[in-house]
Amino acid sequence: MDSLKDYLEKRNINISPNQTERILQTNYNEYNILEQIDLICDFHNRVKDGEGIYLLRLQSNIGKEMEECKINIKRLKKMLLDIEKQGIKDAFENELLSSGHQILLKAEACVKYIGETEYIELIKRSMRSNELSIVSCEKTNLWRCENYICIADTSKLCFNMVEWDCITYLSKIKRRGIHIDYEKVIESFALKSGLDEMSETYIKAMVSYPYEYMKVCARKREGKKKWSAEEYGEKLSAAKFKDGDCLV
């Protein structure tokens, strides 16, 4: 059985953790984002349906992200309900009660935008094709060198729907406040990946999910950051703008 390194090298993909060609990207525009999307699609197309791919000892994350999104919705509901029952105690709870219901509606709409039947069909396709997800898709981890694709870190490589690489990559760019034609980029990804309109719809919905807002709520709930209630409130307020507008 081939190792992961052997499997990738047969497909002109090199693991290059110390390569000097790695690009530390600071400027984003539609052109270089589309260029990276093309590279992500090229990686996916090189590795899918490969002989023996199912033997690689990789984790399967199929369905994991969607379940996490649903769990965060339930937790946000509980936080809001607790504040409504017990009253506002600090600046964080004041901001949460002020904006939380609107964010909750947005999050629920995103996960429900594609029907359960359609979602299951996407999962089945991913499993049939043994699709691999890179997870970390930026130029610091994935770049092209002539006919080769170079990847620095394969530790997050897993079996998953290819849509999630596009979702994760574009969500990070969106939270940086970078304004591009996201629908055009998603259409490009779907076309180059041989995906249909259902996949485009799914990507648009999940790129619209309020990840940053949910992240701040999780940090407050778990106490991972030693911020004051005022700081948490400010982070939550900023998260609304970082998450940006809905694409659906």
Image (spheres, rainbow, N blue to C red):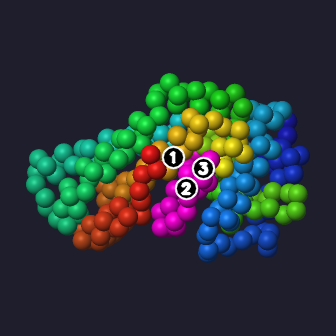
Q: Nearer the viewer, residue 137 or 186?
A: 186
Count residues near mark 2 (Cα–Cα under 10 Å), then give few for <14, some for 14-19, many for 20+. Answer: some
SS at circle 1: helix
9 over 144 or under it: above or below? above
Question: Disc 2, disc 3: CB below 8 Å?
Answer: yes
For the question of whether residue 21 can be seen, the reply is: yes
**What number is the disc on residue 182?**
2
Dominant SS of magenta comes to helix
Q: Position of residue 209 (x, y in %)?
A: 43, 49
Question: Disc 2, disc 1: CB below 8 Å?
Answer: yes
Res 231 quadrant in image: bottom left
Q: Quadrant of the N terminus?
A: top right
Q: Magenta stretch containing residue 1, yes or no? A: no
Stretch in magenta: 164-187
Q: Amino acid at mark 2?
A: Tyr
Q: Nearer the viewer, residue 60 or 127?
A: 127
